[in-house]
């Protein structure tokens, strides 16, 4: 499927935020609380909160970081 560069960047950012929310919330809960009854429900809730917070930050932050990197660094 062909998409514009802007849409591609948005899809990429959303995918990164979702993946990072899943992985980080699991390990943070596991390290801080261990496995406990209700772990799965608490983890799913944590994923949702992570996505709600991370999505706006990622959609705004990733393009800004890319602009700064492209401004100061070039490929060989």
Image (tube, rainbow, N blue to C red):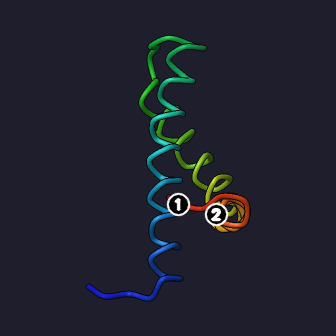
**Residue that badge 2 annotates:** 66
| Crowdedness near tag 1: few (<14), some (14–19) or many (≥20) residues, C-alpha within 10 Å | few
Closer to the camera: disc 2 or disc 1?
1
Given residues 58 and 2, the one toward you in this image is 2
Q: CA distance from mark 2 to mark 1?
A: 13 Å
Label 1: state its secondary structure.
loop
Given residues 41 and 18, the one toward you in this image is 18
Residue 14's place in the image compared with 33, above or below, is below
Residue 25's place in the image compared with 2, above or below, is above
Q: Position of residue 30 (x, y in %)?
A: 50, 17
Label 2: state its secondary structure.
helix
Left or right, residue 38 beside residue 74? left
Q: Which residue is most to the left?
A: 1
Taking the spot 47% from the left edge, 40% from the top edge, the residue there is 44
Residue 76's place in the image compared with 29, above or below, is below
| Residue 75, numbered circle | 1
Query: Which part of the image, by quadrant, shows the N terminus?
Result: bottom left
Tag count: 2
The answer to which image quadrant residue 70 occupies is: bottom right
């Amino acid at each position: 499927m062909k998409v514009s560069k802007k849409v591609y960047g948005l899809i990429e950012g959303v995918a990164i935020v979702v993946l990072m929310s899943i992985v980080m919330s699991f390990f943070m809960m596991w390290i801080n609380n261990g496995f406990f009854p209700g772990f799965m429900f608490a983890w799913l809730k944590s994923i949702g909160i992570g996505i709600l917070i991370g999505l706006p930050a990622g959609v705004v932050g990733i393009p800004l970081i890319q602009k700064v990197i492209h401004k100061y660094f070039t490929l060989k």
